[in-house]
Amino acid sequence: ETVMTQSPATLSVSPGERAILSCRASQSISSDLAWYQQKPGQAPRLLIYGTSSRATDIPARFSGSGSGTEFTLTISSLQSEDFAVYYCQQYHNWPQTFGQGTKVEIK
Amino acid sequence: EMQLVESGGGLVQPGRSLRLSCVASGFTFDDHAMHWVRQAPGKGLEWVSGVTWNSEDIRYVDSVKGRFTISRDNARNSLFLEMTSLNPDDTAFYYCAKGFRGSLITDRFDSWGQGTLVTVSS
């Protein structure tokens, strides 16, 4: 199976600053990469699909990039509501697999 | 508005069975593959099982193969997960998730339920 590795495990950022989260696939997944946001006590929410397309109602401060095996989620200016855990997911190879998550916390 | 509502979780002893349900609304249910994704408390996400719109393709993660059975009833906009021979490693929140497409088991999930907690313990 395709192993997804996210880094860092925890990212401490001040409100208004930029956050860059990384996700690496153990084999090529083309551009079939999604990002999800999960807040405590809530279900995950789709943010980005196809590496760089924002899902419905997702603010423009969220952007994704990459291809092949290296991917990035950038949050351009962190708002209070953005502090959460972020997961990447590949859906190119069966079974679809998730990274272990990056927690974005307030610095 | 798309909505998925799970039910059926609870405390169950090791070796016993449990059936989860998910009722969908706000979209055309039989246009989409449906999935179960679980999350052990404080841990990450794990895809468990998926079924295409017409139930022709059904798959499971290896750890539940032979123990869990996914099914759907398109007439009732419902998804099910029959879980047998439960063990403590199956303890998790179980989320019902909507696949973007109908005929692909490998896909992104664009809508999630709120989850139902399954606790396997004696």
Image: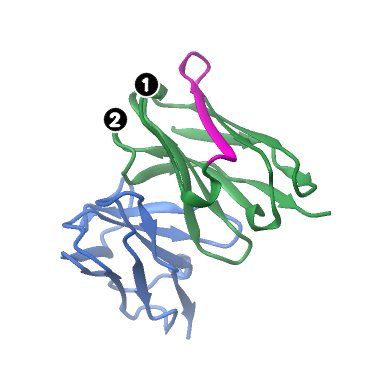
Chain colours: A blue, B green
**Please, what secondary structure does the residue beneath circle 1 have?**
loop
Give percent across and percent down for residue B55: 40, 24
Magenta range is: B66-77
Q: Is residue B74 above or below residue B99?
A: above
Asked whether residue A97 appears in the rendered view, the answer is yes
Reading the image, the residue beneath label 2 is B103
Q: Are marks 1 and 2 in contact (CB under 8 Å)?
A: yes
Within 10 Å of disc 1 (Cα), the crowding (few <14, some 14-19, many 20+) is some
Q: Residue type at mark 2?
A: Ser
Quick one: B39 or A18, which is closer to the camera?
A: B39
Quick one: A38 or B107, which is closer to the camera?
A: B107
**With A45 as the anchor, is B13 left or right in this view?**
right
Asked whether residue A74 appears in the rendered view, the answer is no
**Please, what secondary structure does the residue beneath circle 2 have?**
loop
Q: Residue type at mark 1?
A: Asn
Within 10 Å of disc 2 (Cα), the crowding (few <14, some 14-19, many 20+) is some
Give percent across and percent down for residue A32: 22, 53
- The C terminus of chain B is located in which quarter? bottom right
Quick one: A36 or A12, which is closer to the camera?
A: A36
| Residue A6 quadrant | bottom left
